[in-house]
Image: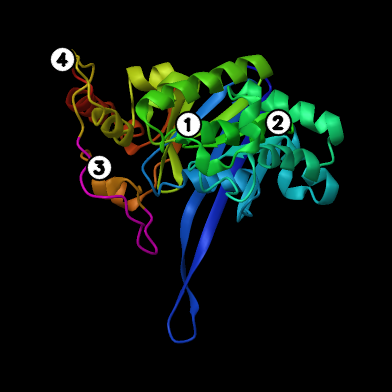
Amino acid sequence: MAEALLEVRHLCKYFPLRGGLFNQHAGEVKAVDDVSLSIPVGTSYGLVGESGSGKTTLGKVVLRLSEPTSGQILFEGDDLGQLTGQRLQEQRARMQMVFQNPYSSLDARKTVKSIVAEPLVIYKRAKGKELDDRVNTLIETVGLRREHLYRFPHEFSGGQRQRIGIARALALEPKLLILDEPTSALDVSVQSQILNLLLELQQRLGLTYLFISHDLGVIRYVCDRVGVMYLGRIVEESTTDALFADPKHPYTQGLLSAIPDPDPERRFAPVEIKGELRSLPPGYTGCRFAPRCPFVMEKCREMDPAFIETAGHWVACHLYSTSERTRGRRGTEANAPD
């Protein structure tokens, strides 16, 4: 396996809850709870899950836009939690983010030239003619023309604005891009153009992606490996091909069942996920997916499952840590051909 560019170890991000007469500490929201992952150089890691599962929070914590509660973030071998001052600034320049909404992430008062040039000016990477040349190159790299540099964000379509955001993210020649739902606000036809641009840039520039999305179709097209996130924790992880061919966790099966499929020869029976994603009550010690799981057992409500390896997948589910009889029953119900 290639050397890891980014490695996250037991990362947690908790937000305190306060209430009562004296605004006392009343609990905490575990937005990211004991997450570990590794992304080799030049690959794409997809992070999927419903809204509220903690994907965006994880991306922000990795960049230290939000400080972690505990855990380690290793980038090129450096523990970002231990870096300060100039060394932290240098490493953060090599990690950039493309945000979900391409309009709100751009300053409406600035021209495209000012937006794309801003990172280069702040980090004192270029000035004068050299700055102009680099901005021209960046804007052409993402498929726009030089005359676009003197316009404002409101004069562009959603897809063009996202291209501007990508150009800005590339200005400091980063190694890692965190892509937070970069196509969810775009029309379907424009989505494919942006995804193809990202794949082209990755191949040409040797980029590594942490791709955050709720769209499994997008993840399948772009990513080499996938982590499925639920209520702050990764519940299944495997290669993209393995995940789509044989999902293990009931939550993953439910997500895949929700994708319209014209092929009647499905490899596994549909799994219905009932209810909505909700925060766990204080003191809850069981599996976080148990309230919605169609295969729930008594053990699930009492003990949080360990993250174990099975058939090339890493999965947090008691169905893979109990008897062979239980596994066989699940296989019949969830994975049998129609």
Residue at point 77% right, 49% down? Answer: 82
Q: Is residue 71 above or below residue 150?
A: below
Task: Pick whichever of labels 3 and 4 is earlier in the sequence.
Answer: 4
Prevailing SS of the magenta stretch: loop
Disc 4 marks which amino acid? Answer: Pro
Foreground: disc 2 or disc 4: 2
Q: Is residue 102 visible?
A: no
Q: Residues within 10 Å of mark 2 (few under 14, many from 20)?
A: some
Disc 2 marks which amino acid? Answer: Pro
Foreground: disc 1 or disc 2: 1
Foreground: disc 1 or disc 4: 1
Q: Find the distance from the CA under tag 2 to the CA under tag 4.
A: 44 Å
Q: Find the distance from the CA under tag 1 to the CA under tag 4.
A: 34 Å
> Quarter holding the N terminus?
top right
Q: Residues within 10 Å of mark 1 (few under 14, many from 20)?
A: many
Q: Find the distance from the CA under tag 1 to the CA under tag 3.
A: 38 Å
**Is label 2 in contact with label 4 (beta carbons under 8 Å)?**
no
Asked where in the image residue 289 lies, by quadrant, the reply is top left
Q: Which mark is residue 264?
A: 4
Task: Pick whichever of labels 2 and 3 is earlier in the sequence.
Answer: 2
Look at the numbered disc 1 and give the secondary structure of its residue. Answer: helix
Along the line of sight, the residue nearer the viewer: 109 or 37: 109
Reading the image, the residue beneath label 1 is 159
Task: Pick whichever of labels 1 and 4 is earlier in the sequence.
Answer: 1
> Quarter holding the C terminus?
top left
Residue extent of the magenta highlight: 272-285
